[in-house]
Amino acid sequence: MTATPDDPTTTPPGRPPVVDLATWQAARDELLVREKAHTREGDAIAAARRRLPMVEFDGTVEVVGPDGPVPFLDLFQGRDELVVYKHMWYDGAPHQGQCEGCTTTAWHLKEADYLNARGVSFAVLTTGRWDEVASYVAFMGYTQPWYSVRDVDGPAGGNMGCLTCYLRDGDRVFLTYSTTGRGNERVNGSLGLLDMTPYGRGEAWEDNPKGWPEGRDACWSWRSDADGNATWGPTSRPVPQWTRPGATPVETLGRRGHCH
């Protein structure tokens, strides 16, 4: 039997209506108009972002990396632009107790080859003590450069949980842009792909049709137990940690992370 859009028996509850290809294409074309308008508005916002003023600060302020203290200027690696992610940190927490929100951002920025090709360097900054940070970086298998900005004021240090951009002019360093919260989503390709699927992120705040699976707390799927079950319990850790070679069930958490 051919499914038709006006036949309520053809589509189970919680599923998109079943239609023919021509009907689907018409609806898709209608949505495309809105998507193109959204893209153009994003382009206009990016243009305004490039016109923001900037703030100069002391590029000789020291941060701590694998080779000890280095001037912030070194993070540019000789390039003129720098993007950093400022990773929240919980002193003394086990690896599985670090922030799952920051983990998902850093995990999606594991390599910076395409940024480097455009003359942009990338680094992760955090307020943790370097010995703890170095252990965590090795545990996660991160390859991008990490630095501790403990006790370093902004714009080099300051608030964490942010994507921040800098510009260099010789030995002069400038803050040009920073965003946080959902502004960090632009680097999380998984969220972008989930937004394209019928059930989306599965979060309670989403506007879904009647009968859709019930949404849960924001970021509910970012922690899981050893069996892959989403949980915030004592056996959970940020999801990417389970993909590490030799990953085993965890001990009781010393501190629960916080999604932001």
Image (cartoon, grey):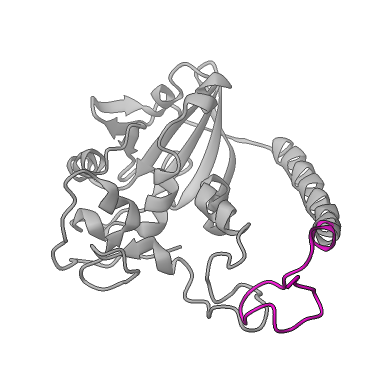
The percent coordinates of residue 155 (x first, y second) are: 48, 41
Name the residue at the left extreme: 251
Viewer-nearest residue: 167 or 3 = 3
- Residue 17 in magenta? yes
* Residue 260 appears left or right of 98: right
Res 126 → quadrant: top left
Res 73 → quadrant: top left
Residues rendered magenta in the picture: 1-25
Q: Is residue 18 above or below residue 191?
A: below
The percent coordinates of residue 147 (x first, y second) are: 32, 36
The percent coordinates of residue 53 (x first, y second) are: 69, 37
Q: At 16% across and 61% down in the image, what residue appears? A: 250
Q: At 46% across and 23% down in the image, what residue appears? A: 76
Viewer-nearest residue: 150 or 142 = 142
The percent coordinates of residue 14 (x first, y second) are: 61, 78
* Residue 11 appears left or right of 63: right
- Residue 240 in magenta? no
Q: How many marks?
A: 0
Res 18 → quadrant: bottom right
Q: At 40% across and 45% down in the image, what residue appears? A: 106
Q: Quadrant where the N terminus lies?
A: bottom right
Viewer-nearest residue: 197 or 108 = 197
Q: Is residue 62 above or below residue 26?
A: above
Tell me the chief SS of the magenta region. loop
Q: Is residue 38 above or below residue 133?
A: below
